[in-house]
Amino acid sequence: MTDRISDDSDFTPEEAAALQPDASGGAALKHVVCSICDIGCQLRAEAGPDGRLGRILAHEDPFQAANICFKGTAAPQIQSHPDRLRVPLKRVGPRGADRWEEIGHEQAIAEIAARLRSVVERHGPEAWAVSTSGWNTQTSHGLDRRLMNLVGSPNWISGVALCAGNTAAVNRLTYGWFPLPDVAFTKCIVLFGHNPRKHSWTPVYNGINFAKMMGAKVIVLDPRVSEQAAAADLHLRLRAGTDAAMALGWLKVIFDEGLHDADFVRDWCVGFDELRARVDEYPLERVEAITGVDRALIAEAARTYATAESACIPWTPITDQQVSSTSAIRLHSILRAVTGNLDAPGGDVFHAPHPGWIPEADLQLNDVISPDQRAKQLGYRTHPAYTYRTAEMLAEPMQRTWGVRWMDQVMGCHMANPTETFRAMADGDPYPVKAFFALGNNALLSYPNQHQVRRAIENQDLVVVQDVFMTPTAMLADYVLPGDVFSERNHVADTWGWGSRLNLSQKIVEPGGEIRSTFAFWRDLAHAMGHGEHFPWATVEDLLDHRLSPSGRSFEGFAAAGVTDAPFPEYRKYLATGFATPSGKVELSSSILADLGFDPLPYHREGPAPDAEYPYSVFSGVREDPYFQTGQRNVPSLRRRVPLPLVFIHPEDAARDGLVDGRWVRLETRHGHVDAKLSVRDTMLPGHLRVPHGWWFPELRGRAELAGAFLSSDAVLCGDSDDLLDREQGTPHFKGYPGRLVAIDPPAGLE
């Protein structure tokens, strides 16, 4: 048995019919990049009747044909959904009452611009905050930051502060770049809690399977018996939130047994002696006591990784969300470096910016905003790891090594801190933030301390949301604008500066009516705000032509030439360029962290411990296959697979507490509670609870406050007081905090 989180992990016969590369039946197809989740699978699509999206089909390339999940095949249901937003709405009742009048796009933009100017005039440009994520992250082209920088606001936030973007920024502290794992061609894959599956992180799942077929070993570190853990060569069931201690234990074995790449450490690393002294503080008996994993298994896993012909540690959302997140992410970086797996075949590879493409950061105009305004960025002084403060310290090394000054990998390398932003919005500390825009981002449910987020949004003078559906966040807005979906726009996907691959995505159908793209929203708002000269592109195709101009191609030329442009990777580029750090080397002891006043060496820090009142360790934020973040609960083919939120518990714990499988329970913490159905699973580690992410109930709109946004959302469970945040980033601790369960009756409307 595995920790399966979909009631139906396979395709229906209708869905399966689209999975074969020859399933087109001769129809005229175009290529698309799916943006229902953030992994960006390349697919094909065709138009259906009445201007609607028809079928989504697998790619014709047999190597990519398997990269399709049931979220992707559900795209036509999303595009033509009867509840889709199609007309701009203006609030006419109290905030949150969900009462609206329809207005035109031009009126909406004019009124938003006037009200935003008023906020800036009264409180300063820093009083404007923007939050993005989800469907529009692939298509902003940096224009959101461009306008914000022209206006003078540094307060851009995103869900990537909790997922991959913060990892990108922290990786740069060690070696100046964020590598991609060479999964398909490695001999050892280490998954720290990450659980790629057939319908979640599908290309990574397929890459792992290919690597295993070619002889690669897989090591999984996870409290649960996840799908990947069940099939792994080694499974270390560590206690939630102890990733950093485990990695320190691995380094202890590697250093003590001489398994590190001594030549690379000597020639290309600084701070080895200091790191070695820190690692010596973590003998295996201590690591065993912290993690709950037998020391012999810890040593075996460390040896397996360090002695493999090649090895990689793919990015993981689990390590992103702990009180020791910065240290744990840095330890992954250090393990790659000291074992010789950095920018090496089968290891974790640096992908240089594509030479024929203008990166998003170049469009953001980060040099336009003054240093004084950058220093007002929320989090700049308190939790600076992914803010402008650190990016400024890396600007010269980045220019020297990569030829770019402000490379914004995964959008996470010079953003504001979300907790600090919502505190300022709610309480005016350290200054008031009074205008809040959320684009493609159900912000209310996307960050910790959901009660504070609500209070923050309700305290605004202006709230603007652009989205595909009426979300709980949109219900709190003053203006709600309808956004497009991936089948309604032309695009070139560039993996957010993480890789160098460019993928074609073609418009299949027109959005129709008053629906506008994110590009159009920012262009039109910029013109209304008096910055039109900096937004000269009339169409998104004009902007794509500009971004492709270094290659001498237009978007039309790119589409005619093929569907992918991926330069062949070059390895060990540091031999010619060094690393984009102040020292030019891999900084095992970080000079930037030292200059910022933090410990330059990684460490383990304990999160809040269970006690007699709250005896369980709660593992929050695990995703279900049919959904991405807070989306898709209104898509019938997906909702039937996981119709209600489930809390997982071990059978021993359920029996002791008298809790029954399939009954409703309330999971309580000191900060809040959620209601869900209980799922008793022997895949769980005793003493642990697993709670899903992002639940709300579109069917309860009009029957429950904010469509049940506070019934089952994990964001209400975890606080963001300073003791619950990672010190360097301000990342919340979602992986192991105290909770308890009590039996309840089903909530009204969800019987």
Image (cartoon, rainbow, N blue to C red):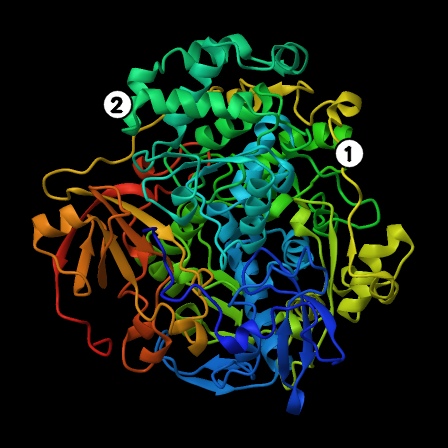
Q: Quadrant of residue 579?
A: top right
Of the 4 image quadrants, the one containing the C terminus is bottom left
Report the residue at 35% width, 61% height from top.
454
Spot occupied by residue 196 in the image (x, y as percentages of width and height): 49, 50
Question: Is 23 on the left or on the right of 386, as rendered?
Answer: right
Question: Is 720 on the left or on the right of 673, as rendered?
Answer: right
Residue under pointer 1: 570
Give the amino acid type for the residue marked by disc 1 in the picture.
Glu
Question: Is 487 on the left or on the right of 593, as rendered?
Answer: right
Q: Is residue 597 visible?
A: no
Report the residue at 16% width, 65% height from top.
663
Q: Is residue 77 visible?
A: yes
Report the residue at 42% width, 14% height from top.
279
Q: Residue furthest bottom?
A: 50
Spot occupied by residue 372 in the image (x, y as percentages of width and height): 61, 39
Q: Around disc 2, counting alpha carbons within 10 Å, would you say few (fewer than 14), some (14 to 19), or many (20 or more)?
A: few
Nearer to the camera, 45 or 396: 45
Q: Secondary structure at mark 1?
A: loop
Mark found first going from the N terminus, 1 or 2: 2
Nearer to the camera, 598 or 187: 187
Give the alpha-carbon distance from disc 1 to disc 2, as whole Å: 42 Å
Nearer to the camera, 192 or 375: 192
Q: Secondary structure at mark 2?
A: helix
Residue under pointer 2: 289
Disc assigned to residue 64: none
